Amino acid sequence: MAGETGGIKNDGDRGTGDVIQAIQIVIGGLLQGAVFAVLALGFSLVYRVTGVINLSQGAFCVLGALLMYTFQVSWGLPVAVAMLCAVLSTLAFGLVIGYTTFVPAVSRLPVSSILVMTGGLLTLIQGVLLIGWSSQPYALPPISGEAPVQMLGIRVPTQGFWIVGTAALIILGLWYLLARTGIGLALRACAENRMAARLMGIDVPLMTLFAFALAAVIAGLGGIAVAPITSLEFDTGGFFTNFGFISVAIGGLGAFAGSVVGGFLLGVSEQLAAGYVSSLFANGLALALLLAVLLWRPNGLFSAAPARRQDVRDEQRIHRPIVRIEGWGGVAFAILASAFVLVLPMVLPPGGILNSLVITGILFIAVLGLDVLMGFAGQVSLGHAGFMAIGGYAAAVLATTYHWPPLAGIGAGMLLALLCALGLSLVTARLRGHFLALATLAFGLVVDSLTVGLTNLTGGPSGLVGIPSFSVAGYSFGTATRMYYLVAVLIIVLVAMLQGAMRSGFGRALQAVRTDETAAAALGVDVARYKLAALCIASMLAALSGSLYAFDFHFLSPDMVGTTRSFEMIAMLVAGGEGTLIGPLLGVALVTLVPTLFQPFALYKTFAEGLVLVLCFLWLPEGMFGAAAVWFGRLIRRRGAVR
Amino acid sequence: MTEFALEIDGLDKTFGGLHAVNRASFTVPHGSLTAVIGPNGAGKTTLFNLVTGLYRADSGEARFYGVSLHDLTPVEVAARGLIRTFQAARIYPGMTAIENVVAGAHLHLKTRAWQHMLWLGGARSEERALTARADALLDLVGLSAFRNVAATELPMGGQKLLEVVRALMARPRLLLLDEPAAGLNDAETADLAALLRAVRDSGISVVVVEHNMSLVMGVADQVIVLDAGSVVASGAPRDIQRDARVIAAYVGGEVAS
């Protein structure tokens, strides 16, 4: 989702001297950075008022630009009128989305859930864009013509002045609003202490909505300004979100000056990396900058985060009901479910559906690991597909290029993923909440950029072809039926093992870490160690899943195991039921099978995934499986085994 | 010679301009029930946080059975047998009442995760033994009826008691309770007093921070009075009640001393 589509087109002619080239690149970086800065301001604004990172920010950027395209190019309205219409439409959309999803989420979900829910909003808005504008790239005509301004041999596109002007206007406007007006005062009061602000008669939900919609408009304006010098597609929002988010993390969450500095710093370093190293690695280098900042100053360059008291729980809202199936009910359920899985291929018509079930099972293995990490240990991972990519590519490359036996390839992939998890934990060990989520997102993006960039090894953006079928000692799992049984047995064994571990002291320690780290430590739970254990399990299962995926498809491309997949897996997990191990299978099946069974729905897949994630967080926090289990439990007896 | 479960030796902690704990010193004899009282802001909870490694003391140290707790993390403190509860009951929200109590036994688990993954007999029987002990403790404090209920659905008093029995599952040598009676009604407070006496009589030393004077005077062997971060009085409950400095600390600072 990152990279190619979002970058500034570099149309300056190279070779007119190194200095001029360098200046040219820096100017490109500053223009790029202006957009990041504007996005980062939106992040900071929402964060200051609500304490939440709004990942849907980037999508409003694209929404604004595509609306502008429709009004200006398709309808032929004058620029000023088109811009007004685009901004007002973005505002209206932001108000509707904010009122229906964000405001209720802020008032009742724990922070980590709101974060992931806004990730769902990002997917949902991208889905809307895909339906409305289809999947082609768009570019707006420059506001004041194509001809660049020439100064001392340096060419600057005139649009650059519009971009910088827009950014300056937004920065000044925001400063005036916050520092000089009554609304600004109320917003700052919400930022200081929401409860106190409410007691002082400030309408906190209204302020939340206002901040969300204002941030949407700011993003929309940024998108409109930058669209003439870049090309935008429905999913470019992910790129903007990532880089806006990274800018604000470099600058310091909630610090407005830091956001602007972070944005420009990121834009310039990214363009320098693209200009002097390779555009394929530009993201990776930008992310290395982020990781360096996080290691050096975990709160960013301009920290605005206040110190927190550890002996007071800051997370009062654990929104998920408890789902337990115990005793003979559990045994009966396990036997029935296993039998169903093993008999299913015999009653199904042969063909495509069995292949889809194999994919469902393979993805479920990765989501199972994510459940241990997120559902039990409470560690949000926005880059989980990165481990799938590591395992998948390692196994596939070893088996295809180096002719290793597939089983050895899978083992090597899982080991590599484990090593990467250990390396990642060195960075994440000191991070909590948003910063942890951010670091995992950065990790996923680094892997993304490596799978795209290491063309010789991975086949680059077009993917790795000719991957053999999975086989053990000459026995090939080349048919869908064989693969199905391999995956089915693997899943039954894995679920049984994890079920055993999760109901033991290990599982209780993970849940203790999820809900209250301080209380867990006071009872002797080594918090860091259990987080690491969960990450190790999750990374190895993701690697296993990624490698089986490659062997099953005989093909692996960066899209299949990219950041979009990471968000998709979270949607599957939450829809199925976090912390239930088997529940996420329903989520995986829903997301994987429905588009296969009903081909016309393919266009709506992105939208539906986002919608499912958002709706589940808001109204079905225990997920489909959890809801079914609770309902079933009430059915068989009023109190007892199931609760 | 008396053996001391806890020796507080000149502990000092400043937050910005606030001198939260000011060279506090006192001792907790082994097997005793010590109450720490004092007005709001006297530094009682900060003292607990210093002892259990949540904060670092600026100077001074706490010794647990003669061994310094300085520089230990909360986990290391707990592993030595010093278990605390929190002012706001911090039961684990995602678990049922019985699971919360069993989770307290974390330090004493013998079987490991892989044994549970393979559903080995030893692992299962340890689990059964822990559950039986947790059930006995729930029964002791009258929470058996709530066994399979989400811990957060218990009334406040129940949550406080649950936190205490969860701490007992950790088999502490010294139990630090931070305002266990806050939010309890009179009957629950009486139950708590009985529980505290039973805990002390079983050989576990107890330190309790408390506002509820009738509870403190009824169960404590010695009372430590903190005011503005300093120990202003210590002694038997009967003596403390008559101490002018204590009355000054509670009623107002202008009483002549």
Image: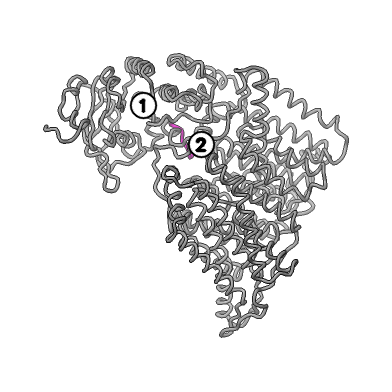
Report the residue at 55% width, 77% height from top: A23
Of the pair A118 and A345, the residue shown nearer to us:
A118
Report the residue at 73% width, 68% height from top: A73
Q: Position of residue A333 (x, y in %)?
A: 70, 23
Say if A278 sits above or below B212 in the image.
Answer: below
Which kind of residue does numbered mark 2 sit on? Answer: Arg
Q: Disc 2, disc 1: CB below 8 Å? A: no
Say if B98 sits above or below A66 in the image.
Answer: above
The image quarter containing residue A594 is: top right
The residue identified by callout 1 is B182
Regarding mark 1 in the picture, which secondary structure is present there? loop
Q: Position of residue A456 (x, y in %)?
A: 70, 60
Report the residue at 57% width, 84% height from top: A151
Say if A638 sits above or below A180 in the image.
Answer: above
Q: Which mark is residue A251?
A: none
In the picture, measured across the screen, residue B18 lies left or right of residue B132, that is left
Residue A411 belongs to magenta span: no
- Label 2 marks a residue whose chain is A
For the question of whether residue A243 can be seen, the reply is: yes
The magenta stretch is: A524-529
The residue identified by callout 2 is A317
